[in-house]
Amino acid sequence: MTNTYRNLIRFSTLLQYKTLFPISIFLLAISLSIILLRGESSRLQTVHALHEMTGALPADWPFEPLVHKNLNMLEGTTDTVLSIVEIVKRGDSLSRIFKRHGISRHDLANLLASNKKSKQLRYLKPMQKITLKVKNGHLVRLQIQLTSLNSAIFNLTESGDYTFLQETLTPQVQLAAVRTTINRSLYLDGKSIGLSDKTLMQLTSIFAWDIDFSQDIRAGDTFSLIYEVLLHEGGMLREGRILAAEFTNRGQTIRAILNIDDLGHESYFSGNGNAMHKAFLRNPVHFSRISSKFDLNRKHPVLNKIRAHKGVDYAAPSGTEIKSTADGKISFLGTKGGYGNTIEIEHGGKYSTLYAHLSKFSKRLKIGALVKQGEVIGEVGQSGLATGPHLHYEFRINGLHINPLTVKLPQARSIEPRYLRQFKNQSTLLGNMLTSMSKSSVIKTSDKLQPANHREILDLYQEK
Ligand SMILES: [Zn+2]
């Protein structure tokens, strides 16, 4: 088995892909810059020119005369087909791009009018790749990249319209593994080993129930990831799913392994099959600072007298999103004295949460509405009695106020029994890989191409 892991975890080619990718786009742009083609009509003209010079042509006149090369000055008009690759810049529009390359304004109007799908050409996003084929100043083909895998193609037809077709790439999936120590921040250190924002967000959302990423991260914390990388023709398209992750926070190590159920739902479980997703989020706001803790003998900052602080205050800029910490039903929505704009949510019969001093409620909410865990319910403000923008958050069990930072949250649900055997195999395998990574040095990735399906990948490793 250990050989399998050694094979899998090899030193990085991934970082090279990442740095080479923009360069390869640039080289592609240069290499495709100008392609000069001679059309049928120019060949005929060459023949006519020769005929005029020589006066007579032999019956078996060769199709490509040797003298052809020396007769360029005799050639008349030639069809010029240009292939142009553009990477959209900030503030770019299609009309600017057309102007830059001298493409007819009439073609732009025609393109935007001739197909419903051309709506998506009105608003370009920076870094989008557009490939244009232009013949004698007229647009023949336009390809625009929509996502890493999808592009839209518009082709000029004989009738002068543009038809639409969508192209979807089938990527190759490779497994990659990285491990790093946090010295500056999770974000900066994650970026420095080449991880995308999306993967880092995915990492924090996997551990969001166990680690408070705004408060708990310390220099010296480490994390390891085994994740998918999507490739096409040797270039990296994007990162895929995280299959397994390990986070060591202040000496405590937590592991999460992906399980995909029969319906394709993806969720993460600890090695022994408990869901990473708990009934309650620890915090209702991200990346904030706790400005006042649960304290039954606190002196109130505005009233200036002893008044129990029955919740936790999160200092955050006005407008910061507030999330419901669990699935539930809105039981109060409105203003409530010193609390200002307040939301209360009931979570089953036993638990309830309260969110106060809001600047704004989410639009669709009303009393009785159902909310999902993590759903944005409003924005931080300082309505009611508040010295600055913050969220006041309370947690109640059977009506009794409990410290939300220390409450023992309800037990996590476990993996469904029918997935248990398969999950145990996967978690043993991926867990061993994580262990072997934690014993060796900094950045590692595999260089094996793998099928997209998680289970297939694992089966493949198990066979060896
Ligand atoms: Zn408070």
Image (spheres, grey):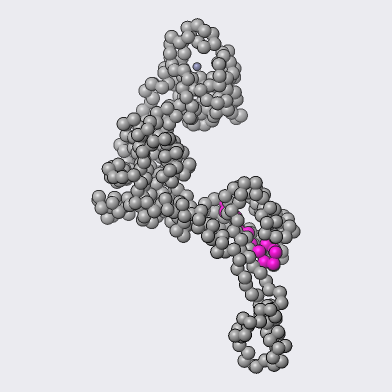
Image position, residue 340 (x, y; %)? 58, 17
Q: Is residue 164 left or right of residue 240?
A: right
Q: Is 192 included in the stretch rendered in magenta?
A: no
Instruction: Determine the residue positioned at 34% across, 30% down.
Output: 250
Where's residue 166, x and y in %? Answer: 58, 57
The residue lying at 44 percent from left, 54 percent from top is: 17
> In the current view of this chain or complex, which residue is farthest to the top?
305
When asked about the image quadrant of residue 400, the answer is top left
Q: Is residue 138 magenta?
A: yes
Residue drawn at x 46%, y 52% as measured from the top left: 19
List the single residue furthest toward the right: 106
Rendered view: 77 above or below 167: below
Mark yes or no: residue 4 visible.
yes
Rendered location of residue 218, percent (x, y) = 38, 31
Magenta part of the chain: 134-146
Asked if residue 265 can be seen in this view, the reply is: no
Does residue 175 sit above or below 411 in this rendering?
A: below
Task: Return the residue nearer the eye: 258 or 76.
Answer: 76
Helix, strand or loop for the magenta stretch, by majority: strand
Q: Nearer the viewer, residue 384 or 348?
A: 384
Q: Is residue 297 above or below residue 105?
A: above
Q: Quadrant of the C terminus?
A: bottom left
